[in-house]
Amino acid sequence: MNGNFTSEMGTLTLVGVAIVFSVLSIIALVVAGFKKLDDHWQTQEESAAQAALEKDPTIDSTSLVLISAAVATVVGGRFRVRKIHRLLSPKTKRTPWSSQGRLTLQGSHTIRRKK
């Protein structure tokens, strides 16, 4: 009986190990599939962002008039805005370091009002 019990335990152990490795293999395949999908989506997003950057920016005439009016009001005269372009894409990641630098540069360009 002792030999039979050992034989059954050995078989049970081998079956258990086979089941565990099978389940782990399935999990690894599922994770690899998700990674492949994520890589595909990342590639599509990057190509869409690149296409958006290469596209000529356009602005409608109403927005241009409003921006011109705001600039003229701040500066105190009549000026013509010839070109407006966006410095960063809305999807570009911004860091606190770059934001602070941008604020410092924009703050140094203060406009003095005529009295």
Image (tube, rainbow, N blue to C red):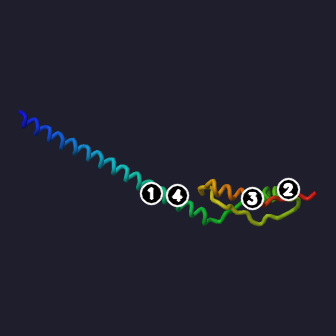
Specify which label sits upstream in the sequence, 4 or 3: 4
Q: Which residue is mark 3?
A: 106
Label annotation for residue 45: 4
Specify which label sits upstream in the sequence, 1 or 4: 1
- Identity of the residue drawn at 14% across and 38% down: 9
* Quadrant of the frame with the N terminus: top left
Q: Residues within 10 Å of mark 1 (few under 14, many from 20)?
A: few
Specify which label sits upstream in the sequence, 1 or 2: 1
In whole angstroms, how far apart are the C-alphas of marks 4 and 2? 40 Å
In whole angstroms, how far apart are the C-alphas of marks 4 and 3? 31 Å
Specify which label sits upstream in the sequence, 4 or 2: 4
Q: Nearer the viewer's eye, disc 2 or disc 3?
A: 3
Please tell me whether mark 4 sits on a helix, a strand or a loop.
helix
Residue 18 vertical placement versus 98 (above, below) = above
Q: Quadrant of residue 80?
A: bottom right
In the picture, measured across the screen, residue 32 lies left or right of residue 105, that is left
| Tag 1 and tag 2, C-beta contact below 8 Å | no
In whole angstroms, how far apart are the C-alphas of marks 2 and 3? 18 Å
| Tag 4 and tag 3, C-beta contact below 8 Å | no
Q: Amino acid at mark 3?
A: Gln
Q: Nearer the viewer's eye, disc 4 or disc 3?
A: 3
Residue projecting furthest to the right: 115
Residue 12 vertical placement versus 104 (above, below) = above
Please tell me whether mark 1 sits on a helix, a strand or a loop.
helix
Q: Which residue is mark 2?
A: 73
Q: Which residue is mark 1?
A: 39
| Tag 1 and tag 4, C-beta contact below 8 Å | no
